[in-house]
Amino acid sequence: MKLRFDDDAEAFRTEFRTWLASHRPSPEAMAAEPSVSTGHAPQWARDFTRKMFDDGWLVPGWPPERGGRNAGPVHTIIYMEELYKARVPRTTNVQGLGIIAPSILDYGTPEQIERYAMPILLGEKTACLGMSEPGAGSDLAALSTKAVRDGDNFVVNGQKVWTSGANYADFCFLFCRTDPSAPKHKGISILLVDMNAPGITVRPLPEIIHPENPDLNEVFLDDVVVPATNLVGQENNGWAMANGSLAHERGMVWLSNVLSVELALATLLEEAPAMLATLPAEERAVAADRIVQLQIDTVAARTLGYRGFAKLVRGGDAPEQALMKLFATELRQNVSLVAAEIEGTSAIEGGALVMDGTQSVDDPQGSWLEQYFHSFANTISAGTSEIQRNIIAERVLGLPRA
Amino acid sequence: MDFEFTDDQHELRDNARSVLASACPPSLVRAVYEGDTAGVDGLWKTLVDLGWPAIGVDEANGGLGLTFVEVGLVVEELARVVAPSPFLATVTQFAALARETGAQGDWLTRVAEGSLTGTVATDGNVSAARVGDGWELRGEVRHVIDGATADEIAVIAITDEGPAVFAVERAAVTAIPLRTLDPTLPVATVSFDGVRVSGARVWASSDTTPDTAAVEMYSNSVAGAIERAMGEAITAMALSTVATCRRIFEITLDYAKMREQFGKPIGSFQAVKHRFANMYLAVEKASSLAYFAALTIAEDDPRRATAPSMAKASASECQRLLVTDGLQLHGGIGFTWENDLHFWLKRAKTTDFLFGSGPAHRARLAQSMGLVG
């Protein structure tokens, strides 16, 4: 066990920090055209993705031909920390870079990699993840969007919902049922579907925060013709691939969650002296204690994340990792709520959130109360907190299914 | 940055666990609960023969020179079996204070060889006044761990010139054992009624300069040395609480998988599952913070000024949940004297209240973070 990063890791930090200082998008450019959907990549974001790819900083752990430099996992942690500190989003197309491109690289054909994965890495295309449906939320395997083989094509019919970024994305990584007679986990396939294909209708779902810039959408698919060459991996093997795809996220997503908590807490600690000074003396100690509890949990989130990470790096199991999504997203919510409560009545002011481009659309922003509402994006999506608790109880602790 | 134990640390833990499985079975703990402390000395002799008290003592003083992380691993294993043992007070309190104050004499050597048990009396109203070339102590400290059995008591006293630390033979004080819920971690009220100390028994006063270079972090004061040592005691107590809670968690989890109602294991019900997920998170959080604090001590990182309080506060939150849910989920059987569960429940509570419960440490943190005046 050791607390500090090695010298070579700190040298790596300096190298990236220096690169970032001269190649980052300017705050002015980011604020002038903020990304308003996770499918939306403004020109500055496209240019920055391309520059990171060219210089081997897009996915440091990958080889140079895929935008990396074969960096180790500890270096990747440092890289993400530095981006976060600089207030530069690594990508505006979170699912595209984090899940979809890696999955196509893992399971796709050379043509699919050329047409779909590489354009994401080069900042030329964005992608959305077509998973949830009106009848398949937490029970994702119950999805019913149908793809029927017709010669060299699939014909797709159905409806997706909560599809982040679908209103701007160039293509969709679509989960659909190709064998209705198989058990529900065994009949699912993945198709790459161009979002401008005839038969696709996207209806944005304005959210409770920043309704003028919706990120979530309904996607209706009516007789959409998809070439069979766009089938990713083996037919009916989609569920297994879904678990593989999400594993890409599990390695590092804990860190994004923790960084989000740390930034929110740092902001709260900056504001705290002024906020506490306005409180009557008898209220101050109570408020201070609540801040202290958040501080303790924030350090706990970082150290718990490090513990799981250290095990993963060694190639072992890291049951702690299963806790991180639940812990960090609920903590992020709690930081906003406590901050709003300490802020007092003025917490109800707001309602005209202006994005400045420094954060991904799904990262809580705005006033503390807006951040609180916004934070439900993360306790509900990608497996609700309740599903996370079931997963922990069943898969990690081995409690029997009901 | 690496938060995984080394192979040597894993081995130490595994060895300790296997030794304690036979050296400290539940029957030994139960005997102590029923007034028979005959097994306590034998257990201590076993630990001494294995060299455990020497783990954290530097090699110059006859120790193994390992870090506070290794000490912490042993503290955890002892807590897992609710061991009645002078290890905690001797190693993580008495020896820590001797080292940090730069005490003259062979105190640490004697701890390492197992020929001396000790404890620390703090948070009392003991005052010391100069008499001749020494000091005279007066006052009382309650809840001193092993206060009625340890060979030596290091006492933190107030003088006109600031805080001071003295070592007093137990035979020179009045120590009255207190009846408590957990007899395996005995505490006593220790009274100093004009006890005189001088020479090597004066560990730190305005006359002494603790020569631990790192005391500079606290402006090289006696108070700094005390704070550093108490950071170790607090962190060890947090580790102890967490390890006890982890055992409660394991025992309760096994029970929920085995106990059936309505034709199913009770652990298959979602209301129960979610409690387990929350308990698991509480244990892992507190455990991570406890080892973080241990690392700040092992590496003498500046964060050791606050990390022990964070660890103790998180351990406190952890035991509130684990004791409550551990007992609740056992139902009636966990409420009986015959079931061993209460050994862990009471130990978790006891270590929570010793060296400051959660609210006390959060209040300290609020001060050090500048949130309250």
Image (cartoon, grey):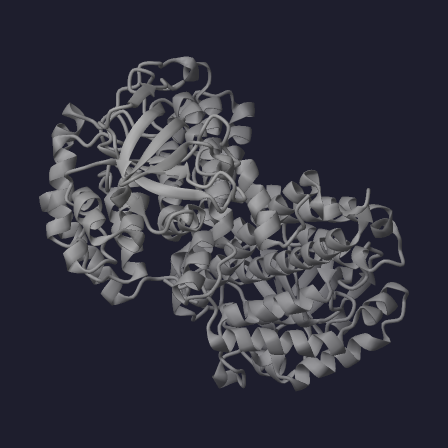
Residue nearest the observer in this picture, A10 or A94: A94
Residue nearest the observer in this picture, A291 or A401: A401
Q: Residue at x 42, y 40 (%)?
A: A178
B359 left or right, relative to A284: right
**Res. A165 image quadrant:** top left
Above or below, comparing residue B233 to residue B211 in the picture: above
Q: Residue at x 39, y 38 (%)?
A: A175
Residue nearest the observer in this picture, B318 or A59: A59
Q: Residue at x 34, y 26 (%)?
A: A221
Q: Residue at x 78, y 60 (%)?
A: B188
State the quadrant of the N terminus of chain B: bottom left
B279 left or right, relative to B231: right
Q: x, y (%) of residue A87? A: 24, 38
Does residue B113 appear anywhere in the picture? yes
Q: Residue furthest front?
A: A151
Residue nearest the observer in this picture, A368 or A63: A63
B237 left or right, relative to B4: right
Above or below, comparing residue A73 to residue A181 in the picture: below
**Res. B181 image quadrant:** bottom right
Q: x, y (%) of residue A255? A: 37, 48
Q: How many marks?
A: 0
Q: x, y (%) of residue A243? A: 43, 49
Above or below, comparing residue A164 to residue B339 in the picture: above
Q: x, y (%) of residue A337? A: 48, 27
Does residue A360 appear anywhere in the picture? no
